[in-house]
C-alpha cells in the first residue's frame, strides 16, 4: 500500500465529500420551502426556480466574470419567481399547488429557452475553501474542498430558527401558517405575510440553483437539477418544518445521492448506477410514510392543505 492509498476508507471519504456537495442545493431549497410552508403555503414551483436560478447564475457569471454576482443574480431571479407565485396565489379561487406546478413548468421552460447559448461556454466557478491542506493525502485534500455556500446554508438555518422562535416577524409568520383568522385579528394581512415569505423562499432556492451551475456539477445543462426542487417538499415534511432538521435531512439526501459517485471513484463500476436512484427511492418512501392517514403530521402549519382534515 502506498502512502497515498487509503484503501477501503476511500468510499466513506468520497461519500462524506459528496454528501456535502450534493446536500448544499437541497439545503437552500428546503430552507426556502420551510419558510414558505411556515406561512401556510406550499410552493411546488421551486423546481423551476432552482433551474432558472442555475441558468441565471451561469449566464451572469459568464458575462461579468464574477461567480458571486452570478449567485446574487440567481437569488434575485428566484425572489422574482417567488413574488410572482405569491402574488398569483393572492387572487380569489386560486390553488397554490396548481400555481406551483405551472410556475415549475414556466421556470424550467424559460431557463431552457434563455440558456441555450450558455450550454457550451465556460463561466467562472465559485471558489472553494481548502480545508484539507493540513493533510498529505490527496483524497483528504479533495474531500475537504468545501464551498462557502455550505457554511452559509448552515448559518441561514441557525438564523431562521432563531428568527422564527425569537422575533416578532417569526411569530407573525408562524401565526399566519396556523390561522389566517388569527392573523387578521392581530391586524396583519395573511396574504402579504405569505407573499413576503414566498419571495424570500424563492431567493433561497435561486441561491441553491447557483450552486448547481457554479460549483457542483459546475456547468449549465438542461435537466441539471434532477428534480431536487420537488424533493425539497418531501425533505421539509421529513424535517417536520424545522430549519435545523432541514440541515440533517439535506445531508441524508446528499449522502444518498453521493453513494453512486463514491463507488465509481473507488473503482466499483458494476451496478453502481443502481445507487444513483437512492435519492428518488428515499423521496418516494418519505412521501408514502408522510401521506399515511395513521401518521400524525406533528408540526405542520394548520393552513397547509396537507394538514387540513
Image: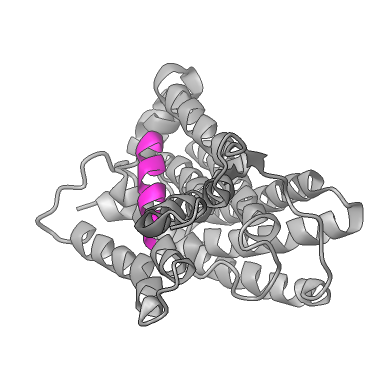
Question: Would residue 168 be counted in the magenta stretch?
Answer: no
Q: In the figure, 260 relative to 234: above or below?
A: below
Q: In the figure, 6 relative to 163: above or below?
A: below
Q: Is residue 19 something that shows in the picture? A: yes
Quadrant location of residue 162? Answer: top left
Secondary structure of the magenta portion, mostly? helix
Q: Is residue 180 something that shows in the picture? A: no
In this orientation, which residue lies closer to the viewer: 14 or 242? Answer: 14
Residue 274 x/y as whole percent:
35, 78
State the residue at coordinates (80%, 75%). Answer: 120
Q: In the figure, 234 relative to 130: above or below?
A: below
Quadrant location of residue 59? Answer: bottom right
Q: In the figure, 237 relative to 184: above or below?
A: below
Residue 30 x/y as whole percent:
46, 48
In this orientation, which residue lies closer to the viewer: 85 or 180? Answer: 85
Residue 113 x/y as whole percent:
75, 77
State the residue at coordinates (68%, 47%). Answer: 75
Quarter of the picture holding the N terminus? bottom left
Tell me how the rendering is colored. one colour
Q: Would residue 304 appear left or right of 84 to someone viewing this image?
A: left
In this orientation, which residue lies closer to the viewer: 174 or 185? Answer: 174
Residue at the bottom extreme, as displayed: 270
Residue 259 x/y as whole percent:
39, 64
State the residue at coordinates (65%, 76%). Answer: 222
Q: How many marks?
A: 0
Q: In the image, which residues are magenta?
A: 243-256
Amino acid at each position: 500500500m502506498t502512502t497515498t492509498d487509503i484503501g477501503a476508507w476511500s468510499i466513506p471519504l468520497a461519500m462524506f465529500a459528496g454528501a456535502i456537495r450534493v446536500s448544499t442545493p437541497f439545503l437552500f431549497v428546503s430552507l426556502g420551502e420551510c419558510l414558505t410552508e411556515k406561512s401556510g403555503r406550499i410552493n411546488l414551483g421551486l423546481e423551476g426556480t432552482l433551474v432558472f436560478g442555475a441558468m441565471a447564475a451561469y449566464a451572469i457569471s459568464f458575462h461579468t466574470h464574477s461567480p458571486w454576482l452570478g449567485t446574487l443574480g440567481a437569488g434575485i431571479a428566484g425572489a422574482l419567481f417567488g413574488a410572482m407565485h405569491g402574488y398569483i396565489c393572492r387572487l380569489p379561487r386560486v390553488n397554490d399547488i396548481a400555481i406551483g406546478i405551472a410556475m415549475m413548468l414556466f421556470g424550467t421552460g424559460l431557463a431552457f429557452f434563455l440558456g441555450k447559448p450558455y450550454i457550451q461556454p465556460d463561466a467562472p466557478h465559485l471558489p472553494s475553501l481548502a480545508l484539507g491542506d493540513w493533510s498529505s493525502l490527496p483524497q483528504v485534500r479533495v474531500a475537504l474542498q468545501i464551498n462557502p455556500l455550505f457554511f452559509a446554508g448552515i448559518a441561514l438555518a441557525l438564523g431562521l430558527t432563531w428568527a422564527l422562535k425569537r422575533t416578532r416577524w417569526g411569530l407573525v409568520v408562524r401565526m399566519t401558517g396556523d390561522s389566517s383568522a388569527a392573523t387578521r385579528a392581530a391586524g396583519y394581512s395573511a396574504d402579504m405575510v405569505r407573499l413576503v415569505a414566498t419571495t424570500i423562499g424563492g431567493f433561497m432556492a435561486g441561491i441553491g440553483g447557483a450552486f448547481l451551475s457554479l460549483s457542483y456539477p459546475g456547468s449549465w445543462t438542461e435537466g441539471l437539477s434532477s428534480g431536487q426542487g420537488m424533493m425539497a417538499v418531501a425533505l421539509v415534511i421529513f424535517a417536520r418544518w424545522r430549519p435545523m432538521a432541514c440541515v440533517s435531512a439535506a445531508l441524508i439526501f446528499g449522502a444518498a445521492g453521493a453513494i453512486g459517485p463514491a463507488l465509481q471513484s473507488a473503482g466499483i463500476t458494476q451496478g453502481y448506477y443502481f445507487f444513483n436512484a437512492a435519492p428518488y427511492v428515499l423521496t418516494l418512501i418519505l412521501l408514502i410514510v408522510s401521506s399515511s392517514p395513521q401518521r400524525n403530521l406533528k408540526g405542520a402549519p394548520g393552513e397547509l392543505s396537507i394538514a387540513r382534515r
